[in-house]
Image: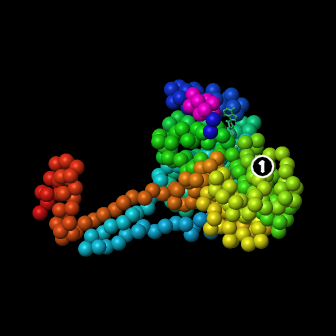
Amino acid sequence: MSFELESYVAQILRDIQKRGIDAIREYSRKFDGYDGEFLVREEEFEEAERLIPEEDKQVIARIIERVREYHEKQLENDKLYIKNASLYGIIYKPIRRIGIYVPGGKPLPSSLIMTGVPAKIAGVREIVVTIPPKDGKVNPYVLYVAKLLGIKEVYKLGGIQAIGAMAYGIGMKKVDKIFGPGNKFVNEAKRQVFGAVGIDSLAGPSEIAVIADESANKDYVLADLISQLEHGKDSKAWLLTTSKELAEYCNKEGVKVVLCESLEECAEKVNEIAPEHLEILTKEPLKLVDLIENAGAIYLGEYTPVPAADYFLGVNHVLPTGGAAKFSSVLTVMDFMKRISLAYVSREEFLAERYLGIRLAEIEGMEQHKRSMEIRR
Ligand SMILES: NC(=O)c1ccc[n+]([C@@H]2O[C@H](COP(=O)([O-])OP(=O)(O)OC[C@H]3O[C@@H](n4cnc5c(N)ncnc54)[C@H](O)[C@@H]3O)[C@@H](O)[C@H]2O)c1
Ligand SMILES: N[C@H](CO)Cc1c[nH]c[nH+]1
Ligand SMILES: [Zn+2]
């Protein structure tokens, strides 16, 4: 992230905090050419539903089913155990109110499926969606997906102003955590509002890295690299290969080609990049997986191209970019939940073990902590 981008976004967010809805309206006019009501009306949902052909409704239903099937397996049970008649553990609770940003430069209903489905599985009660309008309207497929998922609060808001509105509660009730991908402005705004709200990850402009050897189909490799560049000029594509012929074939605008001595060297370079997606198209792709430490998602073999994962495999396509895969992960159901630690201690354990706490309180000079443990009978 550049210093210019950071200060540009900070200035807009500060203005939104200071001037509230007036600033939101102004930026909406300026960046999205929109000057109307932000909240989508029931008639607009109905109109969107009418516009969608029956076959597309079936495609969407089937994709939602596949995404649901994959994500349901991620739901974790509370982890509790009993020791000395005491109860210890971790319990999970859904976040109460979340905001989902749906990209709208090129509207991506698939991104609402990828965020809305796991949110529902987690049991989130209140879901707000924002998406930049085009010619004053929200993409009908996005509204249709929202309707299928039971999401009623959809706002015609995009970019930094959408993130500011959700984070500071302007023109809507404030959310607890913001989810969803977006361009560099959205991503930087999410980074800056972290603290006022939670965020899922830094899921910015799309990226792909491919590790391939001489066994890979050249056309497949090139098509996959170029697929992610289609998202926009900030997207990135790297090819790491041991094949000179493939390197030459894929040496096209926007593709950074790195010719390596070995597949191990390819893996090392990938770990430095920490790409959003990594495809491995080698004779034995599974053998390389152990060497990869940093990637948002790893897809193996000829029949797992990134676009398949973007749309229908069921795996989540909201992934960290810009090197954030070094410290964060693909979106899962558990990102929509909080962990709460739980303990219910028995008298006998407390009395037998409290000398530990009392001594540590003495070491730290915490008289009142010590007293709280000492006075119990
Ligand atoms: N990492 C992931 O998981 C993932 C998944 C899907 C999509 N993506 C990425 O999401 C992005 C979607 O981008 P998009 O542009 O299509 O939609 P977007 O909704 O993210 O951004 C469009 C909005 O940006 C704002 N904007 C544009 N120019 C601006 C400017 N100069 N100053 C301030 N605000 C400005 C406008 O409000 C506009 O509505 C792509 O980069 C794509 O690669 C990432
Ligand atoms: N490739 C994107 C994630 O970086 C997801 C997506 C949505 N639509 C098309 N592609
Ligand atoms: Zn994509």
Magenta span includes 7? yes
Instruction: Look at the image and tell me whether residue 220 can be seen.
Output: no
Task: Using residue 250 as the reference point, say whether residue 351 is left or right of it.
Answer: left
Q: Position of residue 235 (x, y in %)?
A: 73, 46
Residue found at x 47% / y 40%: 196
Helix, strand or loop status at disc 1? strand
Query: Up-down: is 374 above or below 35?
Result: below
Residue 55, percent from left and from top:
79, 61
Q: How many labels sit on residues?
A: 1
Seen in the picture, residue 33 relative to 288 is either above or below; the reply is above
Percent coordinates x, y for residue 57 in the rendering? 74, 60
Dominant secondary structure of the residues highlighted in magenta in the image: helix
In the depicted structure, whether residue 39 falls above or below residue 217: above
Classify residue 163 by image quadrant.
top right
Residue drawn at x 51%, y 42% is 194
Question: Which residue is the extreme one toward the front?
Answer: 261
Give the quadrant of the N terminus.
top right
For badge 1, the amino acid type reads Lys
What span is in magenta?
A: 3-11
Residue at image location 57% in from the left, 60% down from the top: 332
Can residue 82 be seen here? The reply is: yes
> Is 99 in the magenta?
no
Instruction: Residue 309: give x, y in percent of width and height.
Output: 71, 61
Residue situated in front as seen by the camera: 214 or 198: 214
Q: Quadrant of the C terminus?
A: bottom left
Residue 363 lies left or right of residue 317; in this view the side is left
Residue identifier under label 1 = 256
